[in-house]
Amino acid sequence: MIAEPDISAQEIFRAAVRAADPFAGTIKYSSLVLDAFNSGGYKNMSYMAFGKAAPRMAQAIEVTAGAMLRQGLVITSYGNATGYESRLQNPACVMEAGHPVPDKAGAEAATNAIELARSLGSDDLLVCLISGGGSALLASPAEGITLRDKQGVTQSLLLSGADIKEVNTVRKHLSRIKGGRLAALAHPAGVISLIVSDVVGDAVDSVASGPTSPDSSTYADAEAVMKKYLITPPARVKALIEAGIQGQVPETPKPMDPVFEHVENIISTRNRSALDGAFNRSLELGLMPDILTAELAGDVGEAAQWLAERSREKKSRPSCLISGGETTVHVTGSGTGGRNTELALRFALEVEGTKGITFLSAGTDGTDGMGEAAGAIVDGKTARRARRKGIDPEKYLKDNDSYNFFKKAGGLVVTGPTGTNVMDVQVIVLT
């Protein structure tokens, strides 16, 4: 007996999150870390974990490396270390900071990270445990600009509809630690980075703005992104970008830079891990699963339309369509919401009046913009039920206020922090 579609969709999403557990992913590659330490002739091992999955990854490296660890640093978003800090035995410091806009706590955390990296020598192996969110959490403004400058540019980029690669192209060039600069700070130490990918295509130079990865982007690229989205940067940021273009300040380290001679970057957990978990749970629930894509990206309205079309095309039922990725929202209103709640609301309007379609979209990290929700769940009756209550979905959508729409109409998906971050997952149950 198949459960109610909304229950099934939520069970499938929870299975997706479990399958993307960064603890398991880190454990999987721990033997590689230990082999590198032993074969490389290193005398000391330190670790640095930063991002939303940092606590779980830190736990895993402590389980596997134990007494071999000399020091550690764990940096994650506010509330994300709750329940984990007491389990970490070795790290010198556990810090929480702001996300997605950097704050003073993130600047302090970045200072600690820089000091740790600079303290290392050729006898040291640094294990970097990197996950999404690290860009904001490691907030170290480049020389000549302020934290407030970075906050302003970051906020403008997040509202503009720029994708994560474009956002990080700018971030890399406003930082002392991103875009391969952490690897440069740690040189000549060896570096192994295990990475939980929260970017489409799993490009290691994009996750957390690629602090240990060669950077192919330039100051000119950063300027082009801001011009594309009509962002006028603060005077100090403009001056830095212009100085970089003219070669007056160093570029981010490029692929052939010798600082990467003893650096290895490995994707340990990805969105596809979550989709596979959703696929398996769908089968257990008696639904025929189909993974549509692990690279859902682009404008949230176009994504909603595409997913709705796939739902209508599917003839065999009961079934489950699964996708993952990260859409973008160009914010023009003053409401509260995120890409998942907006995607769900747009999908609800696309399938209004259609029976047998239930849709869930949520962030695997348990957050979606502002508010406590990870996303939302809808069906063909959602928009009509809301209108009967006097709640106009189009009005809320126009104001980018999808969170408050679902708070009033019902349908929010609330998980709390999950300890992982592999972008978003969409589940469509067809009955």
Image: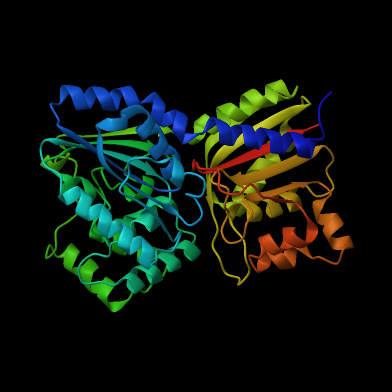
Q: Is residue 160 left or right of residue 402?
A: left
Q: Please determine whether, in this image, residue 41 is positioned above or below residue 140.
A: above
The answer to whether any part of residue 201 appears in the image is no
Is residue 307 visible in the rendered structure shown here? yes
Where is residue 117 drawn, in percent x and y? 20, 48
Say which residue appears at 85% left-offset and 40% top-offset. Answer: 355
Q: Name the quadrant of the C terminus.
A: top right
As drawn, the residue found furthest toward the right would be 388
Counting from the top left corner in percent of width and height, residue 221 is at 29, 57
Q: Quadrant of the N terminus?
A: top right
Residue 112 in the figure: left or right of residue 401? left
Q: Residue at x 39, y 69 (%)?
A: 151
Task: Say which quarter of the image contains residue 399.
Answer: bottom right
Front residue of this view, candidates 164 and 76: 76
Quarter occupied by residue 357: top right
Coordinates of residue 10 in the picture (x, y in percent): 70, 38
Work out whether residue 308 or residue 25 is closer to the camera in this orientation and state it.
25
